[in-house]
Image: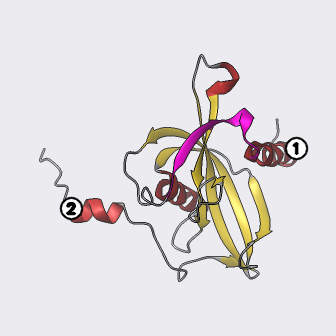
């Protein structure tokens, strides 16, 4: 079997984030965004073993979960995985959607419709499209306020959609 040829063009192309709004999805005037809550569990660390990955915002004001525009040429799951790869540089196993919510941009007043998925991280990449624009940090889930949102959405999902 012949070895695969990896050209500089292929590597560079895979490290470029999608930009622009021409493929963005909208529902009733709200821009649709998708993302993931990347997590891992490290055995033997007790409650500190459950960690979530947060990334810096592009403007450097706080940490958040990776999310971005859901585009018309991809499924909701493909969009969530793409955004997480582009912004956080991780890949893994996508789990069932946690739910959806609507919100308004603090700076532009734009309405959004968001969809989030848990992502059990299997691979943390050394290079990814937004590496130079973002910091990423694994934090104990028990110490971050964002976990309250995760717990609220997960609880809602379990109460309304799960046959548990």
Q: Earlier in the sequence, mark 1 or mark 2?
A: 2
Asked if 83 appears above or below 45 in the picture, the reply is below
The percent position of residue 118, horizontal first and vertical second, equals: 64, 45
Q: Residue at x 76, y 60 (%)?
A: 100
The percent position of residue 88, horizontal first and vertical second, equals: 51, 52
Disc on res. 59: none
Q: Is residue 7 left or right of residue 57?
A: left
Closer to us: 147 or 84: 147
Neighbourhood count class around disc 1 (C-alpha, 10 Å): few under 14, some 14–19, many 20 upward: few
Q: Residue at x 70, y 24 (%)?
A: 47
Neighbourhood count class around disc 2 (C-alpha, 10 Å): few under 14, some 14–19, many 20 upward: few
Q: Quadrant of residue 101?
A: bottom right
Residue occupied by mark 1: 159
Closer to us: 135 or 35: 135
* 137 in the magenta segment: yes
The percent position of residue 28, horizontal first and vertical second, equals: 76, 81
> What span is colored magenta in the figure?
134-145
Disc on res. 8: 2
Q: Residue at x 73, y 69 (%)?
A: 113
- Badge 2 element: helix
């Amino acid at each position: 079997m012949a070895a695969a040829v990896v050209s500089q063009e292929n590597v560079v192309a895979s490290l470029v984030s999608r930009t622009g709004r021409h493929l963005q999805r909208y529902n009733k005037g709200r821009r649709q965004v998708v993302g993931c809550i990347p997590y891992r569990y490290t055995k033997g660390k007790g409650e500190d073993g459950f960690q979530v990955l947060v990334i810096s915002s592009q403007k450097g004001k706080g940490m958040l979960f990776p999310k971005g525009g859901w585009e018309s040429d991809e499924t909701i799951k493909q969009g969530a995985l793409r955004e997480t790869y582009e912004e956080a540089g991780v890949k893994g196993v996508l789990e069932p959607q946690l739910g959806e919510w609507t919100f308004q941009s603090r700076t532009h007043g734009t309405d959004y419709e968001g969809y989030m998925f848990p992502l059990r991280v299997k691979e943390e990449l050394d290079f990814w499209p937004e590496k130079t624009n973002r910091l990423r940090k694994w934090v104990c889930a028990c110490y971050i306020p964002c976990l309250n949102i995760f717990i609220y959405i997960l609880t809602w999902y379990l109460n309304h959609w799960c046959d548990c």
